[in-house]
Amino acid sequence: MRAAFDTNVLLDAIAERGNFADAQALILAVAQERLEGVISANSITDIYYILRKRIGDQKAREAIWNLMTVFDVADVDGECCATALGSPMKDFEDAVLAVSAARSGAETLVTGDRELLEETNCPLRTVTVQELLKELA
């Protein structure tokens, strides 16, 4: 299975926010090649920006490097953004993630965002971290 990871799931794991142990377990499943993981290129910049404020530049760069060695990075280009703009999805940022992930071959999007989980126009199946962990068990 190829799953795209929403930024919030990655930040939970790295910054040890909320139910971070489950997010870390899911990333470990990607590292162990039990799951193909995809992150969008714009998630990388968002994660760096947030982590830099919390843990400093060098550690934030190390965290990004680690993500990029484990996950495939899905392109976000003009065509992706234009498609997302025309999408019936309510949130543009979520639409960019969904379009980018779908173009990279993902069929599932894992997120902690309630609104995205309830989005009926998402081109991918959306699941929580816990739901995906159950599927992998």
Image (tube, rainbow, N blue to C red):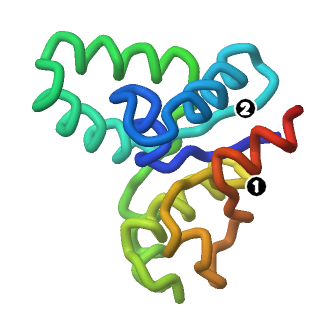
Location of mark 1 (residue): 107
- Note whether 100 is above or below 11 in the view shown: below
Q: Which residue is mark 2?
A: 36
Q: Residues within 10 Å of mark 1 (few under 14, many from 20)?
A: some
In the picture, the quarter occupied by the C terminus is top right
The residue located at (46%, 30%) in the rendering is: 13
Give whichever of 48, 115 is nearer the camera.
Answer: 115
Neighbour tally class for label 2: few under 14, some 14-19, many 20 plus, Cα within 10 Å? some
Q: Residue at x 62, y 51 (%)?
A: 110
Kind of residue sitting beneath label 1: Glu
What percent of the width, then of the height, locates residue 2? 75, 41
Position of residue 28 measured from the top left corner of the image (x, y, whole percent): 65, 19
Quadrant housing the N terminus: top right
How far apart in space, not on screen, are marks 2 and 1 (Cα)?
A: 11 Å
Judging from the image, what secondary structure is the residue with disc 2 in?
strand
Expressed as whole percent of the image width and height from the top left, the position of residue 131 reads 75, 50
Q: Is residue 43 above or below residue 116?
A: above
The residue drawn where x is 55% and y is 64% is 99
